[in-house]
Image: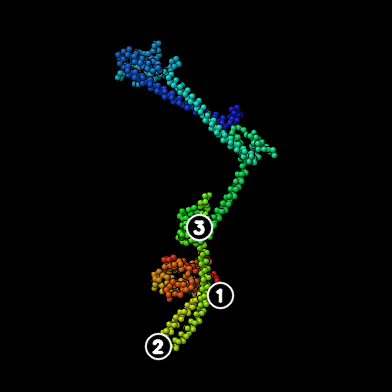
Amino acid sequence: MSAVGLFLYKAGIRTKINLGIMTIVLVSVLLIALAASQIVSRALFKEYQNRGISLSVNLAARSEDPILAMDFLRMRSLIGEVTTSAGDILYAFIQDPDGEVLSHTFSDGFPVQLKTANHVLPTQRCNVRLLSADRDQFYDFAAPVMVGEFQVGTIRLGLLRTQVTSTVKELWWAIFAFAILSIIISDTVGFSLARNLTSRIKRLQVASEEMLIGHREADETAPIAKVSGPSATPEARAASFKKMVAGDEIHQLAETFDAMTAAIKRYIEQLADSKAVLAKSETKYRRIFEDSMDLIFVADHDGRLLDINPAGIRMLGYDSRQDLVAQETLASLVRSPEDARKLFAEIRRTGFVKDRECTLRTRAGGKLEALLSMTARSGPTGRVTEFEGIVKDITQRKLMRRQLLQADRMASLGQLASGVAHEINNPLGLILGYTQLLLREAPDTTSGQDDLRTIEKQTRNCKKIVEDLLNFARKSGTHLAEVKINPALEAVINVVRNQLELDNILIRTHFDASLPEIAGDVEKLKQVFMNMLINARQAIGKNGNIAITTGVAPDGHSVMIIFKDDGPGIAPDILDKIFDPFFTTKPTGQGTGLGLSVSYGIIEDHQGDIQVSSEVGRGAEFRIRLPIGNQSAVKDEI
């Protein structure tokens, strides 16, 4: 390594910065000086030439008359005035057309070589040539003296370049002084900046060394002297470390950071391991969020949805998360505004709600019975920042609960009806028997026979009601056989078709030709179908449609029979009561209220179920599901 290189290697960063700044400033000033001197020189010389041309042309114009008059005194006066007007005009003289000198300003005799040193043509305004004499350079200007188209003489003028040269030299000295001043200023500023930088680097180096030596365990590859043993104090280790590093502050800092790299390597590895564990945990909980069958959501403090899982999107009837988040809030999803207000008031008061039943609104406007658990998250100031919650769909659970309550009610009513029917049936049998005896003995012409027939008719009506009660209360024997649903429906439709057509009610059928057979009692099923059609006719009144559809259920294990009418529909407040015994909306005398109850029992005997849905003003729909395959007959209950 050369002496200069060794000096630069060992020099501090402050010295290097100062040398660098001085070099940059010096080179910049030199380049600027060269460029400026060239530009100024060209500009001055150009201006100098223009000045000489102007003086020559002006003098030529003023010399026309003296030359024509051969007034040598006037010519001498003119060129004398020009030469004394400025100190850089070396000479002036006038030549005739033959080149002879008419007048000049030389005091030591006219130099003959000047006569032919510069020629000008009549067509030229002025001709300029650079001449030299006695190591001095000067410009010679030759301007023609014209009278019309004739050249009657020539004006010659000489200008020294010394003024331009002295001006350029003065410029160089000014630039040199500026360079010295710039170097001094830049060195001062650079010294201040370098001191500030090196002090910060030094503090960083000291802190790094303290952390490396006093608070971290160095790796074997770190450039630290191996001072070990119980007596290796931090001061000794620091001294050993400083002996290992060399060069300027940046080099020393680099050595320190090399040592730190080895010391923190294992911490980076530990961080990578922690990151992997965190990513694994995040993936696990994200999978729970994405794959959960319950609705999971996150909302901000105003209830605007921030995120929701795919199950929630499907549950609410939306196609994408973006559509749901853009259109809905927690408050708008709750079907009742009053319930939404109470819900948010409670959660802001207590911080959470748990297993709260509420009704949500789907995209299509339907109802979603739900069980809501929600927690409010608060920030450092105690203000709610977001809501998190889970929603379980309990629509089917509530439906099953209603069905269980219905079944329990039906069982209780059945037991009551059975007892009442048995108690009434015996007296009715006696009344009917004695009435028939009296009819046999009474003459046909007596008025009492009409009364007896009225008693007989009404007694038979009572017995019919009692028989319906007994059929409802006890399960009569169900004789299972292979039943084809479509032909059974056709048979029932044929019975009531004429009556329905009289009321202008049209039956539309959509039967699945490949519908499988089921095991059931065809006569009891016909009774159910007849009840469905009679109820639909009575609901429509006149002018309407009844649609009957058969098909295989989506589960593939049962058949579906759907009766749909376009009547006035069923009010929501009585929808859960229509299968209750004796419940009817028909006028008095037009129904017993046992038709749907008996139909419910028959379908239940077949291990099926019957469900109803309706909207006021849009008709009602009864869906009967019957399982496919063999079923065990239900024993008679007496």
The secondary element bearing badge 1 is classed as loop
Residue 491 position within the rendered picture, expressed as x and y whole percent measured from the top left: 46, 73
Circle 3 residue: 346
- The mark nearer the N terminus, 3 or 2, is 3
The secondary element bearing badge 2 is classed as loop
Count of marks overlaid on the render: 3
Task: Please tell me which residue lies in front, 365 or 32.
Answer: 365
Task: Please tell me which residue lies in front, 516 or 588.
Answer: 588
| Residue at 51% in and 29% down | 186
The answer to whether residue 328 of the structure is visible from this angle is yes
| Residue at 38% in and 20% down | 52
In the shown orientation, is residue 17 left or right of residue 575?
right
If the image is split into quadrants, where does the N terminus sit?
top right
Residue 355 position within the rendered picture, expressed as x and y whole percent measured from the top left: 53, 60
Circle 1 residue: 635
In the shown orientation, is residue 590 left or right of residue 378?
left
Q: CA distance from mark 3 to mark 2?
A: 81 Å
Pointer 2: residues within 10 angstroms few (<14), some, or many (20+)?
few
Task: Please tell me which residue lies in front, 603 or 433.
Answer: 433
Pointer 1: residues within 10 angstroms few (<14), some, or many (20+)?
few
| Residue at 40% in and 21% down | 48
**Residue 380 sits above or below residue 511 on the image:** above
Residue 405 position within the rendered picture, expressed as x and y whole percent measured from the top left: 52, 68
Tell me the mark number nearer the camera, choosing from 1 and 2.
Answer: 2
Residue 635 position within the rendered picture, expressed as x and y whole percent measured from the top left: 56, 75
Circle 2 residue: 445
Amino acid at pointer 1 = Lys
- The mark nearer the N terminus, 1 or 2, is 2
| Residue at 57% in and 50% down | 279
